[in-house]
Each structure stands twice: as C-alpha cells, then as structure tokens.
Image (spheres, rainbow, N blue to C red):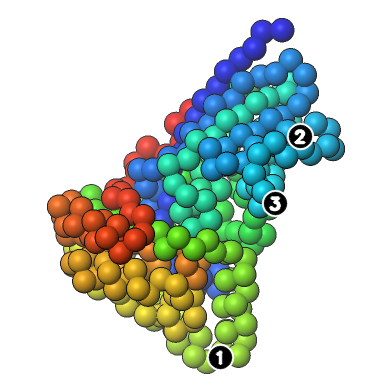
Amino acid sequence: MKLSLGTASAPAKVILFGEHFVVYGNPAILAAINKRVTAAARTLDDSRIIITSDIGAAAEYSGSKFTLLRGGKSARTVLDPIYDAVKRCQRANKMKSGLKLDLRSEVPYGIGLGSSAASCVAAVGAVDSISGRHGRRWVCELAVKSEKMIHRNSSGADCYVSAIGGMITYSKKEGFRKLVPKRALSLVVGNTGARHSTGELVASVARFRKRNMVLFRTLAKRAEEISQKALTAIRLGDVEQLGRLMNENQLLLQNIGVTHRTNRLINTCIRAGALGAKITGAGGGGAVIALAATRKQGAMIAASIRASGCESMEVTVDMKGLIH
Ligand code: PMV
C-alpha cells in the first residue's frame, strides 16, 4: 500500500479583551499569534491511530482500545480531542487507512494560549491535506466539534481565529467578524507556570454571578464598553489607549475573581514599562499578556518577566492562520 504524508500548522491565540464576559453575550477580541502547532500525518497500513505530541504525551487508538504510550493521567485529556479531530476528518473524507500524527507546539499547554484549538485545527489540516483538501472554514468546523470535548460550552472562537488568522471579534449574537488593525502590535506573553482549568474558572464566575447579579451586570456593561473602545483603538492604531483599556479590563477580571496567581506577573510587566497588561483566557494562573509601545520595549518587558523567574515570549499578530 502506498503511504501518504500530510502536514499543516496553525497559530495559537491570545484574548485581548472580553474573556469570561463573552460567555454571557459580551463581545471578545482575539488575535492569532505567531507561535504555531505543527502536525505531520502519515498513513499506516493498518487501522490504528497513533498520536504523539512533544508536550510529552503519546497514545495508540485501535478500535475501542486505548493504549497510553507516553505521559501521565492528563495525557488523555490532551490527546482525546485530537484523536476525535482525526477521526472526524477521516470519516468525512472516507479515508480507510490508519494514521500516525505527530504534533509539535511552540506554546505550552493549558495556559490560555489556545494550544488545544490550534492542535485540533492543525490535526484536521494535516489529515485533510492527505485525503481531501478542503478550505479553512471546513477544517475549522470539524476542529470546533472536537475542541468542545475540552470545554463543552466553547464558543469556537479559538479554533476560528487559529484557522483564519489575524484579529477577530466574537459575540454570541453577532458571531465572528474580522478586525483589521491599523498597526502591528508588540505583545509579550508571560507564563505564570500554573496551569488552569477553563471549565473550573468558568464555573467559578457562574457562581460569582449568581451571588452578585447586580454587580455582575454592572461589570459586564463596563466590559462591553471597554471592548467597544478597544475596537476603535485597534482600528486607529492608538496603542496607548489600548494599553489603558487592557488595565481597566484586568481590574474587572480581578473583581470577578479570576486573576489570582497572575497579579505579581502583571505588576512586573507594568513596572517594566508595559502600556497595559492583563490575563489572557481563563486566568487563575495561565498566561498574561502585556502590550509594548515598541519591539525594543517588548524585549525589555520579556527580560523582566524572565528575571522574575517566569517564561516569556515576544509575539505579534499572525496573519496567515492555518497553513495546509
Ligand atoms: O481556555 P482559555 O483559557 O483560552 O479561556 C477561554 C475564555 C473564556 O472566556 C474564559 C471561556 C470561553 O468559553 O469563552
């Protein structure tokens, strides 16, 4: 049997504005970043599906049998959605052979940078490049279904921005819209080193909201105003205003109780001259993002983050999205 190869890569993401409040209908602003997950698929001459990831997880799926090849208990949480994505693509493209899929990621897992969404998008992209050759939106639709295994109520925004690239706004009412920034953004990502569970944090915000309905409504209204102003600032290229709005957004997130384990790193970014800094994604640890006025300033912020003992990455907006 002839063996076939396919590759694809898809970018990670940051949420610039609106996380958590987006769950209750507010708009969020997301950007794909120039850090990627790369997937290489090759057909096997039997029906197994083998998935390996350089985050230290690997498994073999054969019918209903699951064999962990590498990694601890949490490996399955990472690998199952990717397996689901591969199966969906295989089925859709009427592919008979098994597959081996190898994933390499430039971003850590579980810190809010959308590595699972990018993995699902890249996985479908790689398998599709052997068997189908569909467009990005098709790939995205399949990936969203698999990503929902991680976070049932996921909006799909992570997969969407990863597949399409660039910047987008998302709200439940208006769906996805492309956003064109006037100038390139210099962003720095800091990793608190503490993994978070999006599901648990979303649930804790739901509890907060139930106990503090009136306050939550006020905070959500303010969050919406911030996102609207941020849209204008992005379109005008007003990075000073954007930084101020990020700081305001961070305060709202602090109010709803999701900034624990991030405050020290946020202060480090601000002291190093960031125009603004906030959590990105669910919070409670995970990643923080800082906006720099220039790339030189970004390098200084990144160095301060490292000096405080945390990992850092200087990033910018990825305009390419899925490559397959
Ligand atoms: O999974 P994360 O860390 O990128 O966070 C998801 C963003 C939330 O607003 C907290 C949840 C959601 O579904 O939008």
Q: Going from the N terminus, do you reach mark 3 or mark 2 first?
A: 2
Residue 28 picture location, percent across and down: 44, 64
Q: Nearer the viewer, residue 112 or 22?
A: 112
Q: Going from the N terminus, do you reach mark 1 or mark 3 first?
A: 3
Q: Tag 1: residue type?
A: Asn
Q: What residue is drawn where x is 38% and y is 63%? A: 288
Inter-mark Cα distance, 1 to 3: 36 Å
Residue 74 picture location, percent across and down: 66, 52
Q: Going from the N terminus, do you reach mark 1 or mark 2 first?
A: 2
Q: Tag 3: residue type?
A: Lys
**Label 2: element kind:** strand
Q: Nearer the viewer, residue 228 or 271?
A: 271
**Label 1: element kind:** loop
Inter-mark Cα distance, 3 to 2: 16 Å
- For label 2, the residue is 61
Q: Is 235 placed above or below 262 here?
A: above
- For label 3, the residue is 73
Task: Report whether 148 appears left or right of 129.
Answer: right
Task: Report whether 27 appears left or right of 225.
Answer: right
- For label 1, the residue is 212
Assign the N terminus to one quadrant of the image.
Answer: top right
Q: What residue is drawn where x is 54% and y is 27%? A: 40
Residue 233 picture location, percent across and down: 24, 64
Q: Is mark 3 within 8 Å of ligand 1?
A: no
Q: Nearer the viewer, residue 44 or 73?
A: 73
Tell me whether the residue at label 3 lies in contact with that at label 2, contact meaning CB atoms closer than 8 angstroms: no
